[in-house]
Image (cartoon, coloured by chain):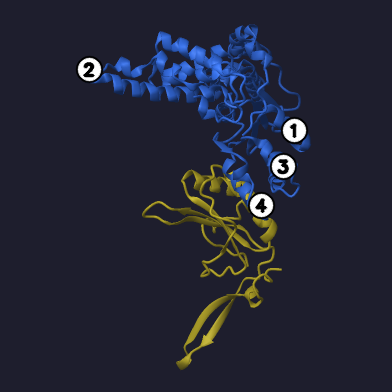
Amino acid sequence: MTETTRSYEHPGITDPVADERAPGTLAFAKPTIAAAAATATVGKPAGSDSPPATVDLAKELAEAGVEDVLRELDEELIGLAPVKTRIREIAALLLVERVRRKLGLSSEAPTLHMSFTGNPGTGKTTVALRMAHILHRLGFVRKGHLVSVTRDDLVGQYIGHTAPKTKEILKKAMGGVLFIDEAYYLYRAENERDYGQEAIEILLQVMENQREDLVVILAGYADRMEKFFSSNPGFRSRIAHHIDFPDYDEGELLEIGEMILAKQNYKLSASGREALERYITARKLLPHFSNARSIRNALDRARLRQANRIVRSAGGATITADDLMTIEAPDLLASRVFGQQAAAGSPLSDESEETFD
Amino acid sequence: MRLTQGCFSFLPDLTDAQIRAQAQYCIDNGWAVNLEFTDDPHPRNTYWEMWGLPMFDIKDAAAVMMELAECRKVYGDRYIRLSGFDSTHGWESVRLSFLVNRPANEPGFKLVRQEMEGRSVRYTTQAYETDRPEGQRYR
């Protein structure tokens, strides 16, 4: 796949002010709700007697258990401040919607279909999974599972193959969230007889008619999604939330790297940490950089080299648990990225991603 | 004559909400949900035609209801039944089956007598509608 969005810069995430603001916006669960709880105790809606007149919003929130999911989201996902803010907003909206329903203030099922745009490795799938949890906790999807598909799973090989295939997937996703990765591949402008169009039509129909049965999340690179939406206006109007995933900055990538290692019971030595910092800076300049995914690949390679180093150096000596856990600078510095950096300026675009890790 | 078969045969026809609840029960038990239809509803005819494939990898009854709506659109003038198949070892059979659709007009069954040797008589039942070929019944 060609990288067309290299130059795509996101203002929100590299801005330190935005980062500092993040903890404040994260506090949606506490202060905002407390304030809202006071205002939520409005008088009973006119004309209805049976539903309760007041609702304790804080209690609702606790009952839904959304706070836990949101806290996890904050703790386990680094950066992504605009995304988190947006998810909190959606969660707040859904909570209010739920309370409104309890008070008998009838309203239609809200449109919850979303589109996630952003560069590779910015956490779209991970957030989609959390989104499914949030929607489930708030009772907007019944089961809360995520079905992740691409074009291959929806579009058939021959005439009459597409509809059953798409329906099969839709059936599987009922009661949960359908996540369509790289959704723009569904529509191929250059081939008007492409079966993707059929899948799109079925999708649109279900998105419209069975809104309470499933939520569709489309994901992909920002510019191509834009093109996809402009050639399929039906999609744009059926999607309520467009969320943009910013690229990570160096500091965040370092944090992500350390988190990945910590999860696998590894750690960086002081020099190793410095090496990773240098690696990230160097890697970002090279083509095919895919954010957190590149870091994960780099660390996988580093583990390989670390294992090799330990096996070779151990000889007869005993090794400690600490040795087995620590990634040293040489494990990272052996990467070809540093060699490539010297030759920067030479065309590298025909190289595959693995070459650099 | 109102035909009754399978579970809940002693009850009035289930509403869609009730069908959905039963389908969800099947799914929650891990049974594959099947839709079958026929225009030969003789009680000994166990071989109904399947609508689509068994639904064994779904999580929510909404999928069943979607298929049922499609099936009714095409075969609304026939009998449709929903069954739950339990594939676990030792069971491997249908655990639940009930009618979810019936034709508007049900003429019922006639009694056929066959005279045998020695004045003995054999009895059998036959649906009036099965006199006509398949696909042209219950019109």
Residue A229 falls left or right of residue A74: right
How dense is the environment of label 1, judged by Cα within 10 Å: few (below 14), some, or many (20 and up)? few
Mark 4–mark 3 Cα distance, whole angstroms, equals 31 Å
Q: Mark 3 lies on which chain?
A: A
Callouts 4 and 2 in the same chain: no
Residue A31, given in percent of the width and then of the height, sits at 61, 9
Identified at 51% across, 28% down, the residue is A355
Mark 4 lies on a secondary structure that is helix
Please identify the residue farthest to the bottom as the structure is shown. Answer: B118
Mark 2–mark 1 Cα distance, whole angstroms, equals 61 Å
Instruction: Look at mark 1 in the image and give the residue it sits on.
Output: A227
Judging from the image, what is the letter of the chain drawn in blue?
A
Q: In which quarter of the image is residue A67?
A: top right
Report the amino acid beneath label 1: Lys
Mark 4 or mark 3, whichever is nearer to me: 3
Instruction: Look at mark 3 in the image and give the residue it sits on.
Output: A188
Instruction: Look at mark 2 in the image and give the residue it sits on.
Output: A317
Residue A171: mark in rendering: none
Q: Nearer the viewer, residue B38 or A289?
A: A289
Residue A195, given in percent of the width and then of the height, sits at 69, 48
Instruction: Look at mark 4 in the image and give the residue it sits on.
Output: B69
Q: Mark 1 lies on which chain?
A: A
How dense is the environment of label 2, judged by Cα within 10 Å: few (below 14), some, or many (20 and up)? few
Mark 1 lies on a secondary structure that is helix
Report the amino acid beneath label 3: Arg
Q: Which circle's residue, 2 or 1, is located before the other in the chain?
A: 1
Mark 2 or mark 1, whichever is nearer to me: 2
The color chain B is rendered in: yellow
